[in-house]
Image: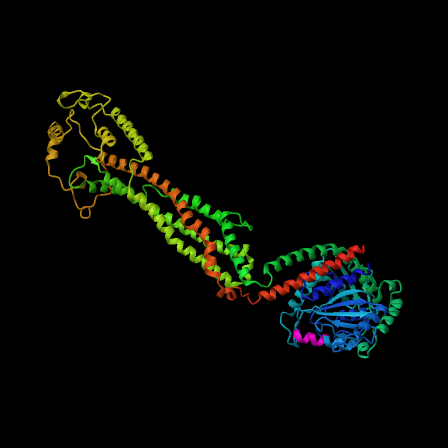
Amino acid sequence: MEALIPVINKLQDVFNTVGADIIQLPQIVVVGTQSSGKSSVLESLVGRDILPRGTGIVTRRPLILQLVHIDSDDRRKTSEENESKKNGRLYRGIDGEEWGKFLHTKNKIYTDFEEIRQEIEAETERISGNNKGISDDPIHLKIFSPHVVNLTLVDLPGITKVPVGDQPKDIELQIRDLIFKYISNPNSIILAVTAANTDMATSEALKVAREVDIDGRRTLAVVTKLDLMDAGTDAMDVLMGRVIPVKLGIIGVVNRSQLDINQKKLVADAIRDEYAFLQKKYPSLANRNGTKYLARTLNRLLMHHIRDCLPELKTRINVLAAQYQSLLNSYGEPVDDKSATLLQLITKFAAEYCHTIEGTAKYIETAELCGGARICYIFHETFGRTLESVDPLGGLTTIDVLTAIRNATGPRPALFVPEVSFELLVKRQVKRLEEPSLRCVELVHEEMQRIIQHCSNYSTQELLRFPKLHDAIVEVVTSLLRKRLPVTNEMVHNLVAIELAYINTKHPDFADACGLMNNNIEEQRRNRMRDLPAAVPRDKSLKGPGGQSLSPTEPVTLEGEATKAAAGSSQGIPVSEQTDGGTGNWRGMLNKGEERPAADRAMLQQPLPASPHKGYAVNLLDVPVPVSRKLSAREQRDCEVIERLIKSYFLIVRKNIQDSVPKAVMHFLVNHVKDCLQSELVGQLYKTGLLDDLLTESEDMAQRRHEAADMLKALQKASQVIAEIRETHMW
């Protein structure tokens, strides 16, 4: 058990060499207000005057004090080793039985403890200045002596409330933050120092200790200045734990007064006087109080604490060692063969880029879609939903359709709905598919660009070593993508242009849709015939010219003839055709008109204004078609036919575009970049004249590699130290 504290000292030395505090080692943290006697307690444990003295704030930097117990054999051995050194510039052997060493002075040995005190003052002012300010940069001091027990203590600035002199206004907050930095370490033991001539209930040391150690399992209280209590009072209740109980105990000590210090009273003499005072004032508690009992108690508590902490420390060290090994690997080894290294990095980047697209990359993104998965999402979700949201008749009003029909007929009234009007309108709607198709190309191009950054961050961390090579690779890939973008856009534009070049009304799906539409129109016509009002003579409505009777199943109507013509006419889409007993000519229409009542004929003979509703060629800009008027039955029928045909054909084209655009993007952009990336990078970058420039490391990379290597070495050494303890069955 006794050997556990030197093990912690070894670990502390290991991590001090790399200047890191990533491991929270077991140690005793001394906390108290200014002038509560903290420094006197530490000097009593050391047995020497080593700490600066004065009024106000004296301890302005954390002092990590390691006490190492040695015997006579260890002292002689160390002395012989030091005297055998050829270079006596640092030290010429150890004349005394006690000595000290600072971390910042390397291997320099201090046998004069007054010199140690002066060095602490000088080092404090070097970092903290001379304005009574504080610093969190610790001073590391190791004391070797046969008169001490193995301990690791941390002396912190005393708690203060009001800034004095030119101290910072937030000095209280700075000291509090510094104290919490050390006592928050779960592996630390808190030594809360309180003066006996103050009220224990107002102890600032116990207050801050309880904020981090709520159950009090790692707090030990020390009551100083027992000899300075008011006459007629004692600290019996406090020392017995009746005022404020402390789990680890409360130990009372007697410090040297300022007069004793000024008169150079030895610590050993002060300890003897302390023992006499306790025997006289607190005879029943004398064996459980005093500096010597405090030292033994701290040694025992620290050993048990170390024993409990070592398994967790070992795990923590192993985890950190693995992390730093991985970090060092990412930094890579110094480059020997630049040509091979450059080719290797280029090949690896190209492979990782392709693997990211294919979904076989080593580093799979879990936060968002990336690479090939995102491209798939763009094709089938983003692009697909956008096309489906395009209304086949969007932006097309009934008046637009009617105007197109009339403009396509010229000055003559139409017997059929002109096919030209259908083609004109359907091309206008198909053209609307080009914009979302080009946007799809743009989204895929952006994702291909994002893959570059993904590979740089996650897949090829070696590129971080060579920022110029990284920038060059990004430029080459970006240039390749930029060159393929207009080619892909042109192909997508051509896909839409191909659909616009030839309106295939013989398309099987379109023919099926037309047949279904004709059947629907036929069914609607029959329903209307059945709903004719009773005032219309049935025989008159079913007789042709000359009184010839027609079959009820074949009524002579505009709707019926339009349907028949739609199936067989090659000149257009029929909508108005009057049959006259098989003659079907314009005279029949005139004769039909003569049979009308006189009132109707008189109405027809009245002069009518030029109107597009009667089929005359007019200037629609001068005579706009009124939008609000009600369309005639024939106009509604013509528009309905055209709209249904447009919708049917538009859906066919949209299906083609939704299938062909992703194929074109994959062929002309994605697959082309995958196939040509390796050769493009090699052709642009693998040149002798560029080797030295491209493989120039960043300025801090060598420094970071060196620091990571040192830290890894320290962690491995610490792991060995703990392994040695396990071999000797120390825990």
> Which residue is more in the foreground, 67 or 348?
348
Q: In the figure, is residue 547 to the left or right of 502?
A: left
| Residue 285 appears left or right of 28 | right
The relative height of residue 661 versus residue 8 in the rendered view (above or below) is above
Magenta region: 120-128
Q: Quadrant of residue 52?
A: bottom right
Please, what is the dominant secondary structure of the magenta stretch? helix
Q: Can residue 629 be seen in this snapshot?
A: no
Q: Quadrant of residue 107?
A: bottom right
> x, y percentage for residue 609?
14, 41
Number of numbered callouts drawn: 0
Q: Quadrant of the C terminus?
A: bottom right
Is 579 included in the stretch rendered in magenta? no
Task: Quadrant for residue 29, please give it.
Answer: bottom right
* Residue drawn at point x = 27 percent, y = 28 percent: 522
From the viewer's perspective, is 351 left or right of 329? left
